Amino acid sequence: MIIENRAVAVWSEDSGVDDCRPDDSGEIIVGTGIESKLGLTVDVEVPGKVLVRAPLTADVVHADGAVHRTLLAVMSDAATGLSVFSGLEWRAIGTTAELRVDYLGEPAADAEALLASGSFLGTTGDFGTARVDLRDDRGNPVAHAIGIMSIEKVEPVSWTERGSATFAEFELGDVAVDGRRPGEAYAAITSGMLNFRDAVHGGVLMGLAHEAQNAFFATDTDYDFRRLRLCVDYLRPAPSEGRLVFRSTVVRGGRRLRTVRTEIAGSDGKVVAVATGTTAAAARAS
């Protein structure tokens, strides 16, 4: 996620919570066309604590009841950025440096929304860290995330001076890979995947990494796999066009746990991110 905080631009001298909201709705539509397409809204509870909401529609819940991992990634990314930057006492911009999501369960069948509660933990040098707890609106745990943001102090500008941006339509179905080659997968970059800086959105990149590792695990017909964790280290902005290449290798191949490392590169061969995924493995009955 790329985000600007509003510590100076929209917070008053007494840091009243209501002053961080650009309208009277009590909610802020988050980020780019990706967040808007997924229906994300956010309440700033107090500085450094946010609650991001997303409706659980048929588009984001699979037939087996599992929620689309791209939604979890985008919500974790948004809650991380918003909690970090709302917790700073000075205006800043920044990008996601690392995002780790631990998968705990699936939403209840009658759940209508997913909630991501973000808490600012603190800063170390030019980096801010936040913790995100994701639950359905029935209180069931779905995931837990830790995110690290690279932050840069900037001069304040007013909300109206920030202007507006137009984004292409995001389609969740575009978060897909071609994994027909052993150890490799490919994904086409669409304009709807891009963020403010014309690079692939970090949450979408994590979603694509998840799909690439799924394709990699699918080549092992002797085991069933249950995803436990995915961590993405963002090394540089992903390109705005062409395709992404995912190259996966096993770094731990035990009988109960498997860890896979996936390098993500643009068409020019430059590695833009590294994803590390851990799964529980169970031998299939013969």
Image: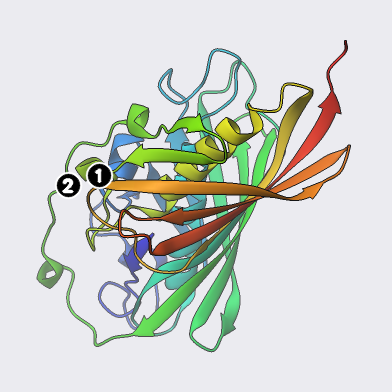
> According to the image, what is the colour scheme of the structure?
rainbow
Residues packed near mark 2 inside 10 Å, few (<14), some (14 to 19) or many (20 plus): some
Q: Residue 57: where, in percent of width, then height?
A: 43, 22
Q: What element carries label 1?
A: helix
> Is mark 2 in CB contact (under 8 Å) with mark 1?
yes
Q: Which residue is drawn at 45% across and 26% down?
A: 60
Q: Nearer the viewer, residue 246 or 40?
A: 246
As drawn, 134 above or below 202? above
Disc marking residue 72:
none
Dividing the image into 4 quarters, which one contains the C terminus? top right
Question: Which quadrant holds residue 163?
Answer: bottom left
The residue pinned by badge 2 equals 167
Give, as a three-letter code, the residue at label 1.
Gly
* Mark before the other along the chain sequence, 2 or 1: 1
Secondary structure at numbered mark 2: loop
Amino acid type, mark 2: Phe
Which residue is rendered at x = 27% and y = 55% of the image?
Answer: 195
Residue 136 visible within the image: no
In this rendering, the answer to whether 132 lies above or below 128 is above
Quadrant of the image containing the N terminus: bottom left
- Residue placed at 32% from the left, 74% from the top? 11
Residue 13 or residue 237, whichever sits in front:
237
Up-down relation of residue 260 to residue 273 (above or below): above
Q: Residues within 10 Å of mark 1 (few under 14, many from 20)?
A: many
- Residue 109 occupies quadrant: top right
> Can you see residue 112?
yes
Residue 162 screen position, x and y as percent: 15, 69
Question: Which residue is denoted by mark 1 in the rendering?
Answer: 33
- Residue 153 location, x and y as percent? 35, 86
Q: How far apart are marks 2 and 1 (CA)?
A: 5 Å
